[in-house]
Amino acid sequence: RKEVEQDPGPFNVPEGATVAFNCTYSNSASQSFFWYRQDCRKEPKLLMSVYSSGNEDGRFTAQLNRASQYISLLIRDSKLSDSATYLCVVARNTGGFKTIFGAGTRLFVKA
Amino acid sequence: DVKVTQSSRYLVKRTGEKVFLECVQDMDHENMFWYRQDPGLGLRLIYFSYDVKMKEKGDIPEGYSVSREKKERFSLILESASTNQTSMYLCASSLEVEGYTFGSGTRLTVV
């Protein structure tokens, strides 16, 4: 079983739709959580950190549920430019620094 | 903004050649990483470094070595390139358990 699991998709949604991505992690010692966005043939870029209290950045909302070891990303009012792969990332610093990337969820937003 | 610069965007090398991939970051980050990314396999950690002259093996170090003589520079070396090392190589840097900044990647083809 992978330490960080994501639905690979692809998710095909129309413009204006709300879409949610889920991610589960297996190591309860995980401390930091992130969502990255990766455009085709480009490098991953940090989209947002994820906090227990939840956080929002414009149309994007991230949630963390430590009890269920679950992270989510909600995109409201999808734009064509949101089409990308979204990577869930989990990090810990217990006896060594370790960051684990999920394999990513592919999103296509259609006109 | 942190900038991570990889020396080449595209590279074509012959089987058996020694290949050097260079990465430089300009924000005094202690941590630097080399990943490769392949379709369906996601990001896989090759080597990482927490300090000058320090290096640690990641998940797939075989066939690779690294060098970190200066804090800002982390080099990945393919001792004898093989066709199965054809991939996208991504360098990243970070501060402790924080989000990464990636370079734009080097797409290496070994023929």
Image (spheres, rainbow, N blue to C red):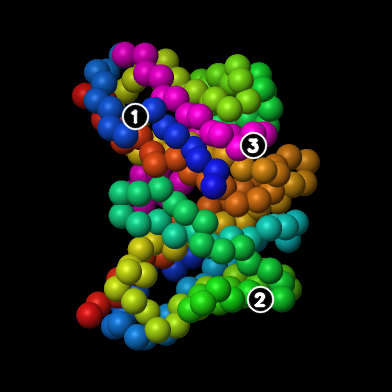
Query: Based on the displayed image, in which of its 4 quarters is residue B81 positioned?
Result: top left
Question: What is the secondary structure assignment of the residue under circle 1?
Answer: loop
Q: Is residue A88 magenta?
A: no
B57 w.r.t. B36: above or below: above
Of A25 and A97, which appears nearest the observer? A97
A63 w.r.t. B22: above or below: below
Q: Residues within 10 Å of mark 2 (few under 14, many from 20)?
A: some
User: What is the residue that sits farthest to the right in this orientation?
Assistant: A95
Instruction: For marks 3 and 2, give the CA distance.
Output: 27 Å
| Magenta span | B17-44
Amino acid at the residue labelled 3 = His
Residue at 32% of width from left, 23% of height from top? B82
Q: Chain of mark 1?
A: B
**A76 left or right, relative to A96:** left
Question: What is the secondary structure assignment of the residue under circle 3?
Answer: loop
Amino acid at the residue labelled 2 = Gly
Q: State the residue position of label 1.
A: B8
Q: State the residue position of label 3.
A: B29
Instruction: For marks 2 and 1, give the CA distance.
Output: 39 Å
Amino acid at the residue labelled 1 = Ser
**Do dots 2 and 1 share one subunit?**
no
x and y, in percent, of residue A108 in the image: 30, 71
Q: Chain of mark 2?
A: A
Q: Is residue B22 magenta?
A: yes
A80 w.r.t. A40: above or below: below
x and y, in percent, of residue A33 in the image: 63, 61
**A16 left or right, relative to B4:** left
Residue at 51% of width from left, 62% of height from top? A47
Q: What secondary structure predominates along the stretch shown in magenta? A: strand
Question: What is the secondary structure assignment of the residue under circle 2?
Answer: loop
Q: State the residue position of label 2.
A: A54
